[in-house]
Every structure is written in structure tokens, then in C-alpha cells.
């Protein structure tokens, strides 16, 4: 068996040779780590982190790139309108149509920039919106070209072949109801330039109705089958609108023959089928789009909420106290998120995983400890390091197990840069005791421990999203509520208010977007949920004749008063019941 060659001086260790430095900073960092490894002061390993892509991040927020995307989309819509009008009338009319479509597209894009700043902050999301709209406009143009190229197809087929709900359905599910309705309005307006004048009104009505139905039916989608159901509703709406505008020839059936009935069937199937096929295509595209654009729908959150995940199963076995704590935090955060209009499914799933870092050293956390406390053998500084490390360990485990990036962010942010106050106070008390010994001449002043608050703070950052802020507060509230001896509604309310106000005072909620109104609703929700969880039970009185067991009536009637009913008595009773039957 060949021996593994040890790295020579100046050579990267085996586990780092594949990670070549890509910048001068990374080069100097790798040299420093290699020297520490050679001196035995480092293991040579480093924690997992998301790959730093500074260029991609800058491009994703570049105003110049976003402006270029807007210009290309408006130009694309104008070219389609120019081409369509040019094939029918030509001349100056095509130029007017192209210019009008360019102006209308610019107004629609300005509306997107003003109304949906959260979406337009990322160019990848802008690209998704524009691609969906461009695809729908291309489908409209293609439908008109196909019908014009086949004279046997009637004019109504131009309207029946259009996938009106494609962009609204995708954008409504991925980016929210508002963006979905914006797609309805934009696709309807720009698509009107690609229709003959006598078909503009029916097109606008059908586009608005089908698009609105697609968005409203998918307000809360937690199963992929709901998208197929949305396809049925879209198809039904298309058939109704088509009948109302006589795009489907119901009036000619009275004197018509077999041919008219066949044409009617084709028209109904076309109108209904386009809606159904749109739902099926969107259902298949969603997972790909979620992965490509770093988006997560409620469907994916529901799939991630499976408690049989290997990390959660491991937590149940190795850290049952942490598992129970996570379940309670999930209930608290989900209820609070529903009150303020945040994402409750995301809060629940992220709460499940927010403390997975405790799996590295579960016995060092109070909820998993037995009779002994490992911190009794450690200094407060070392204890704080162990407690703080569970955040970094959790991020490392989440990346290793390829959890959703939003879960990784919550793990990193749920403690913010708050102080591990218990061990900080313990360290200060020990320092005061040492100072007293120094004053009495029993200790050397140089041996006094240095207590720096920076060594007792989590690395942060503070919560950056509403959901992360909700989970951070729910985590603190649940942990503190366990210390209440006799929880009463007033005690619980005071505890919740104190924790929330302390977090505000410490600046932990400055960047998460929670308003004062949100915090008021969350405090009420936390209080109500904790009261229902920690309510007291009545004291059941003991029975005077405690020797009589809680056995079935038949056994007590036969005179058996022991704690176990004899097998013979059960067999006799069973035979009696069988004989009666």
C-alpha cells in the first residue's frame, strides 16, 4: 500500500491544493494559515462559507445593467409591434405602432421601478420579470403569424392560442401577488399592439380576466397540484370570455351540422387546453426557476418542513431538548408572522434548523444537560466561546447539507451580535473577586483576567429580514419563558415586553424592517401563544380507595381490585361476548 506523501515546504496541503488562491488577499491568507499549520497552531482547515462572488453581486445590483435590460425589453416589444403592423398595413403605420409600443413599454418599466423597489434591487429578478413578459409577447406574435399563415383557421384562433396566464402565474407565485398583477397589466397593454384593431377589445378583456384569475387562484400555493387546478380555472375563464365575445360559434349551432359541432369542440378545447397546459408548464418550470434565481416558494418551504430530515432526526436523538425548543420557536414565529403579514412557512422551517449547530456539543447547552454541567469545569470565557461557536457550526452544517440559503442566513443572524450576558456577568464577578484578593495582597495584579465584552458577543450580523427578526425574538422569548417559576399572564406579558424592548435598545432589530406596529402585534402574539402553552392544570384529587385499579367495569364488577386484570378474566369475558354474537 503506497504511503501518502506529506506536503513539502512551500506546498499546499492535500485538502487545500484544489482551493488555489484567486486574489492577493487570499494568497497571503493561505500563506499565513500554512505557517500556522506547520507550527502546530492550526489544523489547516477552515469553515465552509458560501462562495464569494463579488463580481456577480455587483452585477446583480448594477444600475447600468438594469437600465440596459429595460432598454432591450422596450426595444424588443417595439420591434414586435413594428413587424406585426408592417406585415398587415406597412408604411408609416408600422413606425407609429413601433414608437407607441416603445413609449408604452418605457412607461410600464418606469412603473415597475417605482412600485416594486424590492424586486428591482436585484437585476436577476428584473431579468426574470422581463423574460416572462417577453415570452408571452412572443407567444402572441407567434399565434398571429400561425393563424395568418393558415387561412383555414379563423380569426378567433388568434385569441384562443395565446397563453394569457403564463407571465402572471409564474411571477405571482415567485415574486408575489403585486408583481403578478403588474404582469397582467403590462402583458395586456403591450400585447394589444400585436392584435388587429377589431380584436383589441376581446384581447384586453380575455387577457385581464385570465391573468387575474391566475394570480388570485394562486394567492397561497403550498402544493404543486394547486397550479394544475389553477390551469382548470384559467381555461374555464377563457371559455366564458370567448363565448361572451362570440369567439366560440354558439350562434351557428341551431342550423349547423356536424362540421359546426366539430369546430365548436375544437374552439372550446383550444381555449380550455391553453389554460390547462399553461398550468402544467409552470408547475414543471417552478423548481428550475427557483434554483436559477435563488427564490423559494411556499411549495418548497412545505417540502423542507419534513421532520424526517437527517439533521432533525439527529437532533431528536442527540439533542432532544434543543429539538423541543426548536419546535416551540417554530410555533411562536409562525403565529407572529401570520399576524404581521410575513412568511409563516419560512419562519417555521427556519426555526426547525436555527440551532443545528448545537449538535456538535449538545451537552454544553442547558436544555440538553443532565445532572452534571460541563461549564463548571470551564472559565466563563471558554464557556462563551463554546456557546458562540454553535452559530458558526450551524452555518457550516447547513452549507454541508445544502440547506436553503435563507435558512443559512437565519442561522447566522438569529443571535445578531448580542452579548452572552450570563457568562459575561460571571466573568465580571470572578474579576471582582480577584481584585479583592489583589487588594488583600493574596494575588498578583498581573494575573487579573481581562474581561472584554467583544469576546462575549456573537459574530453577527444582526437580522436582515423580517422573518429573521421574528425568529430571533421568538428564540429569546421561548428561552426566557422557561425560567418562569409560576407563569401567569401578567408575568408572561412583562417578560415578552422586556425582551423586545431590550433587543430594540441593543440595536438588534435596526436592519430587519420590522415596524413599531409589527412589534406590537408580535408581542401580543407571543404572549397569547406562550399563555396557551404554559397554562396551569387543575390539581386532580386522589381517590379515597386507591387500591381499586382503573380497570374496565367488567373486571371491577367481578371483584378484581388489583392493578392488573388476570388473563383468565379477560378470556372469560371475550368468550361470553363471542357466544352472544
Image (cartoon, rainbow, N blue to C red):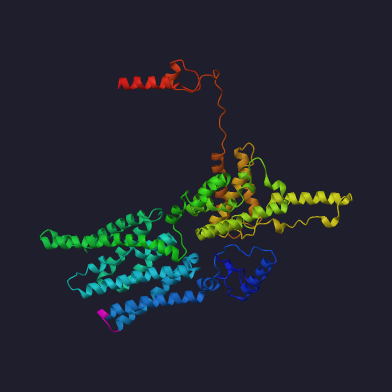
The stretch drawn in magenta includes residue 90: yes
The stretch drawn in magenta includes residue 301: no
Seen in the picture, residue 106 relative to 541 is either above or below; the reply is below
Quadrant in which residue 252 is drawn = bottom left
Is residue 256 found left or right of 107 in the rendered image?
Answer: left
Q: How many marks overall?
A: 0
Relative depth, front residue between 11 and 198: 11
Q: Measuring from the top left, give residue 52's x and y in whole percent.
A: 56, 69
Quadrant in which residue 190 is drawn = bottom left
Q: Is residue 168 visible?
A: yes
Q: Measuring from the top left, give residue 245's x and y in whole percent.
A: 23, 63
Is residue 104 found left or right of 376 in the rendered image?
Answer: left
Seen in the picture, residue 143 relative to 472 is either above or below; the reply is below
The region drawn magenta spans 87-91
The residue most toward the right is 441
Quick one: quadrant of the C terminus?
top left
Q: Measuring from the top left, give residue 27's x and y in whole percent.
A: 62, 74
Residue located 42% across and 68% down the image: 128
Relative depth, front residue between 481 and 210: 481
Seen in the picture, residue 97 relative to 500 is either above or below; the reply is below
Q: Measuring from the top left, give residue 302's x and y in whole percent.
A: 44, 52
Residue located 34% across and 58% down the image: 213
Q: Is residue 332 visible?
A: no
Is residue 188 found left or right of 327 in the rendered image?
Answer: left
Quick one: quadrant of the N terminus?
bottom right
Residue located 43% across and 61% down the image: 174
The residue most toward the top is 559
The residue most toward the bottom is 91
Main secondary-structure element of the magenta-colored stretch: loop
Amino acid at each position: 500500500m503506497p504511503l501518502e506523501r506529506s506536503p513539502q515546504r512551500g506546498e499546499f496541503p492535500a485538502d487545500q491544493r484544489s482551493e488555489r488562491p484567486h486574489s492577493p488577499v487570499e494568497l497571503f491568507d493561505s500563506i499565513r494559515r500554512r505557517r500556522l499549520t506547520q507550527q502546530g497552531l492550526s489544523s489547516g482547515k477552515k469553515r465552509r462559507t458560501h462562495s464569494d462572488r463579488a463580481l456577480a453581486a455587483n452585477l446583480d445590483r448594477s444600475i447600468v445593467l438594469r437600465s440596459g435590460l429595460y432598454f432591450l425589453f422596450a426595444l424588443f416589444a417595439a420591434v414586435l409591434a413594428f413587424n406585426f403592423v408592417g406585415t398587415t398595413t406597412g408604411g408609416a403605420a408600422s413606425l407609429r405602432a413601433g414608437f407607441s409600443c416603445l413609449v408604452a413599454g418605457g412607461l410600464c418599466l418606469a412603473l415597475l421601478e417605482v412600485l416594486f423597489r424590492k424586486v428591482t434591487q436585484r437585476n436577476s429578478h428584473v431579468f426574470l420579470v422581463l423574460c416572462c413578459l417577453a415570452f408571452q409577447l412572443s407567444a402572441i406574435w407567434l399565434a398571429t403569424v400561425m393563424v395568418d399563415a393558415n387561412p383555414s383557421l379563423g380569426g378567433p384562433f388568434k385569441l384562443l392560442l395565446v397563453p394569457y396566464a403564463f407571465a402572471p402565474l409564474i411571477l405571482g407565485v415567485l415574486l408575489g401577488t403585486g408583481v403578478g398583477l403588474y404582469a397582467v397589466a403590462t402583458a395586456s397593454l403591450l400585447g394589444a399592439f400585436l392584435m388587429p384593431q377589431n380584436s383589441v377589445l376581446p384581447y384586453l378583456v380575455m387577457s385581464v380576466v385570465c391573468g387575474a384569475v391566475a394570480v388570485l387562484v394562486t394567492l397561497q400555493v403550498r402544493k404543486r397540484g394547486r397550479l394544475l387546478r389553477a390551469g382548470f380555472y384559467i381555461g374555464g375563464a377563457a371559455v366564458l370570455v370567448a363565448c361572451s365575445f362570440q369567439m366560440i360559434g354558439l350562434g351557428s349551432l341551431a342550423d349547423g351540422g356536424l362540421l359546426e359541432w366539430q369546430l365548436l369542440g375544437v374552439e372550446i378545447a383550444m381555449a380550455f387546453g391553453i389554460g390547462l397546459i399553461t398550468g402544467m408548464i409552470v408547475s414543471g418550470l417552478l423548481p428550475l426557476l427557483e434554483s436559477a434565481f435563488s427564490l423559494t416558494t411556499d411549495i418548497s418551504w412545505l417540502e423542507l418542513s419534513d421532520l424526517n430530515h437527517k439533521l432533525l432526526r439527529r437532533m431528536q436523538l442527540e439533542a432532544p431538548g434543543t429539538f423541543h425548543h426548536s419546535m416551540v420557536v417554530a410555533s411562536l414565529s409562525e403565529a407572529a408572522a401570520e399576524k404581521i403579514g410575513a412568511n409563516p412557512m419560512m419562519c417555521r422551517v427556519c426555526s426547525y434548523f436555527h440551532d443545528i449547530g448545537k449538535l456538535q456539543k449538545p451537552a454544553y447547552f442547558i436544555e440538553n444537560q443532565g445532572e452534571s454541567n460541563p461549564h463548571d469545569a470551564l472559565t466563563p470565557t471558554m464557556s462563551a466561546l463554546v456557546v458562540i461557536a454553535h452559530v458558526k457550526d450551524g452555518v457550516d452544517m447547513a452549507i454541508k447539507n445544502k440547506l436553503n440559503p435563507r435558512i443559512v442566513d437565519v442561522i447566522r443572524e438569529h443571535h445578531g451580535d448580542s452579548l452572552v450576558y450570563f457568562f459575561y456577568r460571571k466573568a465580571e464577578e470572578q474579576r471582582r473577586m480577584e481584585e479583592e484578593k489583589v487588594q488583600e495582597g493574596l494575588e498578583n495584579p498581573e494575573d487579573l483576567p481581562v474581561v472584554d465584552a467583544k469576546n462575549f458577543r456573537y459574530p453577527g450580523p444582526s437580522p436582515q429580514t423580517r422573518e429573521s427578526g421574528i425568529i430571533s425574538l421568538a428564540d429569546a422569548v421561548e428561552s426566557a419563558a422557561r425560567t418562569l417559576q409560576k407563569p401567569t399572564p401578567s408575568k408572561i406579558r412583562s417578560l415578552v415586553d422586556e425582551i423586545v424592548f431590550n433587543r430594540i435598545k441593543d440595536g438588534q432589530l435596526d436592519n430587519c424592517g420590522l415596524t413599531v406596529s409589527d412589534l406590537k402585534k408580535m408581542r401580543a402574539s407571543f404572549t397569547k401563544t406562550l399563555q396557551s402553552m404554559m397554562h396551569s392544570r387543575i390539581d386532580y384529587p386522589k381517590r379515597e380507595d386507591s387500591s381499586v385499579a382503573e380497570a374496565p367495569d367488567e373486571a371491577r364488577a367481578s371483584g378484581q381490585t388489583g392493578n392488573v386484570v388476570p388473563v383468565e378474566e379477560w378470556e372469560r369475558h371475550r368468550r361470553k361476548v363471542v357466544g352472544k354474537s
